[in-house]
Amino acid sequence: MYSFFFSRRQKMAAVNILVAALLFHAVQYGDCMCELRHPQQQYCESDFVVLAGILDKDVIYHKEGFPMAIHYIVNIKKVFKAGPEYENATKTMIISSTSGSGVGELEMDVNYVITGTIMDDNLYTSICEWVKPYHNLTKAQKNGLRFKYDSGCQCEFSFCREGQCGQLDSNNTCEWEFGIMFDCYHDDGICFHNGEECVWRETRKFRQCENNIYLGDQKFTNEVIPDPM
């Protein structure tokens, strides 16, 4: 693992990030296997979620001459989620990697959403966290970060295969179909608790995505209710 330090200036923070490897959301990163999680699930399970811009970088080379890490200077522009432990942390972020993952490179002048954990007063993120250019997020994901994801953090997320969804005997779970509706739930789905059970919020974009897919007899009964917003 490699660490970086940053100093805060009022509500803005300058961060020096020493990155060994950082790749984007997928099931497998090089030799690393990561659990596939819904963006809302990553938000809820993280100790902090921030929006950060890349200001500068410095490639760190191994003594044998190959690139080992990239040293980034980033500006934390917004904190979407952070508990009391965030304020007490030393603001040392550690981005973990494995030797087989290679060196991922973040782009200058791009704002990224970054999730992570706090341990021993340090901020940690990894290749298995949600690290994605903010401009590539969908409207539902941006709304989720601002205020809607919190409403479903008491819920659980569960994958289900086509034809096997809607069979859970649980009011505390939003099922995510691993099939033709996968992208609809990933990009536009927001899970929340309506007072009785956990259900998917049906946004306009979600309905459009669903209407663009021929479901036939494979449509499952996992409840989706209209968005009141």
Image (cartoon, helix red, strand yellow):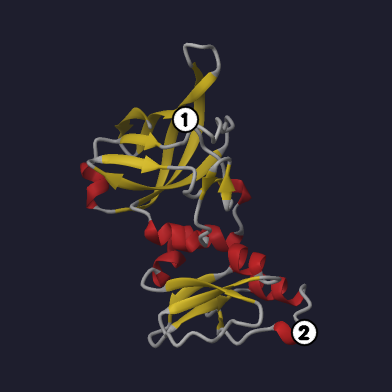
Q: Find residue 205 and report its image quarter.
A: bottom right
Q: Give left or right: position of 126 versus 165.
A: left
Residue 30 position in % (x across, y down)? 58, 40
Residue 13 position in % (x across, y down)? 36, 34
> In the image, what residue occupies the spot 64% across and 72% down?
206
Q: Nearer the viewer, residue 171 or 53?
A: 171
Binning the other alpha carbons within 10 Å of mark 1 as few (below 14), some (14 to 19) or many (20 upward) gives many
Q: Amino acid at mark 1?
A: Ala
Provide the secondary structure element on which disc 1 rests: loop
Image vertical order of residue 70 relative to residue 139, above or below: above
> In the image, what residue occupies the spot 50% across and 33% down?
21
Identify the residue position indicated by label 1 in the image. Answer: 20
Binning the other alpha carbons within 10 Å of mark 2 as few (below 14), some (14 to 19) or many (20 upward) gives few
Q: Amino acid at mark 2?
A: Gly
Identify the residue position indicated by label 2 in the image. Answer: 216
Q: Find residue 45 and report its image quarter.
A: bottom left
- Please state, as top left, top right, bottom left or bottom right, where the N terminus lies in the image: top left
Q: Nearer the viewer, residue 134 or 130?
A: 130
Q: Is residue 229 visible?
A: no
Q: Is residue 82 visible?
A: yes
Which numbered tag is attached to residue 161? none
Q: CA distance from mark 1 to mark 2?
A: 46 Å
Provide the secondary structure element on which disc 2 rests: helix
Residue 156 position in % (x across, y down)? 42, 72
